Image (cartoon, rainbow, N blue to C red):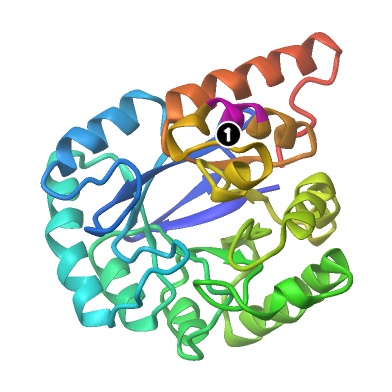
Amino acid sequence: MTFTLHQGENNTLFPLDEAFGILGILNVSPDSFYNNAVGKINEEAARLLAGGADILDLGAESTRPGAKPIPASIEIERLAPAIRQLRMDFPDARISVDTWKAETAVFAIAEGACLINDVSGLLDPALPGVLAEFKPGYCLTYSYGPRGGKSADKDDIISDAKRFFEVRLKLLTAAGLPEDRVMLDPGIGFGKSRSDNLALLSRIGEFREFGRPLLAAISMKSFFGDLLGLGSRGRGEVSAVASALLWEKGVFWHRAHDPSRIRDALRLAAALTRDCGQGKARQV
């Protein structure tokens, strides 16, 4: 299976020559709860890349519970100096932009972003047209908005997620975005209940039926705090363990605040699987 990231005039084919890939989280929103990169973009980018991040996932709008939405103009105002600094100082780094707004996506792609990470599940009706025109990589998240919504009320969260992915994949391809540009994220959090989150994680491998790479965006999630009684700084080890367990279920991409810790956990999981004679069979 390949996943295509559009970078300038060339397409770079994924998967990587490894059993997993990592998006390093780079927050430039002033109200981000963890590893805020405002005023220290180079320092944080260097740490993420040194820790093994394959893509820098740049976000300018907090989607934590209770966070206030911002217009695209402010989001772009925050992103512009950060993404331009990264392009200058880390010219070989691949950059993703975490946005659900079409206007911001146009700006990000023009500035060299190869991936649009949309946590809203296509809330902006103009976004499919932008994606079809420029054909970047795109992460489709099972969500009914950047801060959650009606998905928490579903009786069968897995069936609903499958319907969600099926409908939106058809919408994207009908608009003109090749399916090989898309990865899928089950959207842990975003208004979902504890039981819904557990179901999505335990059955995440079922989403492989769509033939697209899966992303686990679970790093430091408040879900872990609710489940295990952990503060935000106590969720790192749990995030690493969960990432390794999800890799065993076929999850290729992992979004991380601390790539070095996640990479060690994933390398261990991959090594144990290879020792069982399975090689890179889960490289999806």
Boundaries of the magenta span: 237-241
Residue 140: x and y in percent read 60, 66
Judge whether residue 238 is colored magenta: yes
Residue 142 in picture, x, y percent from top left? 66, 68
Q: How many marks?
A: 1
Q: Is residue 235 left or right of residue 32?
A: right
Using the image, determine if residue 46 lies above or below residue 124. Answer: above
Of the residues shown, which amino acid type is indicated by label 1?
A: Ser
Q: Is residue 231 above or below residue 168?
A: above
User: In the image, what residue occupies the spot 80% across and 9% down?
Assistant: 275
152 relative to 48 in the view: left or right = right
Q: Quadrant of residue 103?
A: bottom left
Residue 126 highlighted magenta (yes or no): no
Q: In terms of image quadrants, where is residue 280?
A: top right
Q: Residue at x 62, y 47 (%)?
A: 226
Write the residue at 20% across / 81% down: 73
Q: Secondary structure at mark 1?
A: helix
Magenta region's main secondary structure? helix
Q: Quadrant of the C terminus?
A: top right
What is the crowding at mark 1: few (fewer than 14 residues within 10 Å), some, or many (at least 20)?
A: many
Residue lying furthest front? 229
Instruction: Indicate the quadrant where residue 48 lies.
Output: top left
Q: Position of residue 166 (x, y in %)?
A: 78, 75
Nearer the observer, 101 or 213: 101
The residue to which callout 1 is attached is 239
Q: Tell me residue 37's x, y (percent).
A: 22, 45
